[in-house]
Image: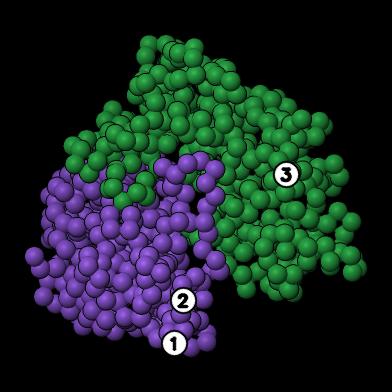
Amino acid sequence: MSALLEVEDLRVRLPTRQGPVTVVDGVDYEVQPAEVFGVAGESGSGKTMSVLALLGLLPAGGAADGHALFGGRDLLRLRRSELRAVCGRDIGIVFQDPMTSLHPMLSIGQQLGEPLRIHLKLGRSAAKRQAAELLDAVRIPDPESALRAFPHQFSGGMRQRVAIAIALAGNPSLLIADEPTTALDVTVQAGIIRLLDRLRRERGLSVILITHDLGVMSSIADRISVFYAGRVVESADRKTLVTRPRHPYTRALIDSLPHPEAPADTPLVPIRGMPPAAGAFPPGCSFHPRCGYAVASCVTDVPPLVREGDRLLACPVDPLRA
Amino acid sequence: MSVLELEDVDVTYERRDHVRLKAVVGASLSVDRGQIVGLVGESGCGKSSLARAAVGLVAPSAGRVRFEGEEVSALTRRARPRALLRLQLVFQNPYSSLNPRRKVGDQVADGLPDGAGGRAGRARVGELLELVGLSPAAAERFPSQFSGGQRQRIAIARALAADPSLIVLDEPLASLDASAQAQVANLLVELSRELSLGLLLISHDLAIVRHTADVVSVMYLGRIVETGPTREVWAAPLHPYTEALIAAVPRSDGAGTMPEALPGEVPDPARPPTGCRFHPRCPHRFARCPEEEPALEDAFTARTVACWLPRDPVPTPPSHRAHTPSAPATNDSPSSSSHEGVMPTHKGGTA
């Protein structure tokens, strides 16, 4: 099976007052058709930038380098106008906060109709029919009247459904979801997770799910890559990664989570220290100052991401054997 | 003895269209010294309004709030009564609750009852910073030099400066990364035990509350619908709403279990449903539920629940409501609209 998206040696630099800093430092990943690919990491790990870079959505002055093959073309070498045709038609995006990603003064029908007319070249009445179908597909009750409504008339969960409908308007093969449930209540979050899962099964949609929430990740992602300080430290299928994590950071991250199944009163095990800021990534393995297993080479050499059985791992010491 | 006691508290707001809205209805809860009480519920359920009433930031329209036996009166333009110094509040967002232009030490010193003056004041600030796991040297720095988790520690140190017996924390962990969340959650448990401090922990995150709170109260549309020891409530929720909240928590076990969505949405608090407020979304509703509102009743020892469903007299909840983590829906389950949390009969978003 050939991958839908193949990203190779991606590097992203962002301007700061202290000069340009590297926030993504040589990242590889691929997304298969109809799979949910999870990008996990804490804030500042470069997880969002490593995906937004593909669509030319970096902050002003940001620069991306590397390759991102999608449908036989390298997204990082497309002209602005070519990228605009891909973005929204072949690749849809959903952001964290549907309150700010929807336009408050335009009706849902106007916002949903625009991509249908631009990307699919539909006429006004055909666009309206299609818009109602999209709202129905994301389970918005009474789509006809919802088209005439404005974002403030919907709850947070319903707004996120509308945002997903807009992202699906061009009938994309890939949906990028950047923390799509972080702003939502847990009960509403469950509905959005189920919606994404159904879209994957019914439409063969691939999803890149960016989230810091490993609980959300482990309920829906097929494969997960864990980001730390601009690099991937471990990558594997969901079950392997969550039940048998090998990288000390992945293990620490999972131990720090409140497990619904763990006996009550189990104290949480925090990771000591805190994630480094962009521009101040430690040399060698960036996790070494917080790692209980670090050896001398961790301080000087960047461990390569190498295949170990069913996973990719960037750690020369094996804490499970040690 | 309870350090904080809320008895039948109502909080009422007037909306811009002059509709009176009851954000909190008849809420009762108590917090002892050294005890952590969790208050959970979806956004808009009134938990923050309850927190504000508990510390006197809003006046309850009915009922009583007592702190160390004395009635808490709502804050006026005048100085806060000295007795209420020992009742403190920590907010959700440490990026906006700390002044970016003042040194951390000065802001912590603001909380000292006798002022910041002199060597004693500075020493106390250093102690407080150490108590929350920061270096005393942090006093000389500015908030921007700290991460979110560290800023929340500073906000907690400032609250501790007043030597409180109770701190109300409104979503103190919501804006933090996973590792910082665990650190601050553990810190709260330690502080509560070591200083025999009562904590009212308001959170939408049940998983975190389960690891920290001794007792949990569940709130829905202004009403507390269930209260009990956290461990028991989690193991066998009595109220269908509590059950739904627990089933919606994603499980990080790698099994690919789908969380359960709760159909429908929280109704407009200005027009709450008749009878039990949860009945339109309740999978177990029956004829009585839309007719009469159930009061909080003692269910088992130390537990209360507001629900008409029959309960066994022995402390084993009915099997159809026992939480069964072993048999949840999986990826392969057929999807329906109710599985995704949308009520098929819902009137639509065009309110």
From the rendered image, report the letter of the chain displayed in purple: A
Spatial CA distance of label 3 from label 1 is 46 Å
Discs 3 and 1 lie in a common subunit: no
Is A122 situated left or right of B261 in this image? Answer: left
Q: Nearer the viewer, residue A280 or B211?
A: B211
Q: Nearer the viewer, residue A219 or B274?
A: A219
From the rendered image, report the letter of the chain displayed in green: B
Crowd band around label 1 with a 10 angstrom C-alpha radius: few (<14), some (14–19), many (20+) = some
Q: Nearer the viewer, mark 2 or mark 1?
A: 2
The answer to which of marks 2 and 1 sits earlier in the sequence is 2
**Kind of residue sitting beneath label 2:** Ala
Discs 2 and 3 lie in a common subunit: no
Looking at this view, name the residue that lies furthest to the front. A322
Q: Which numbered tag is attached to residue A300? A: 1
Element assignment for label 2: loop
Crowd band around label 2 with a 10 angstrom C-alpha radius: few (<14), some (14–19), many (20+) = some
Q: Position of residue B311 (x, y in %)?
A: 45, 14
Q: Position of residue A73 (x, y in %)?
A: 14, 77
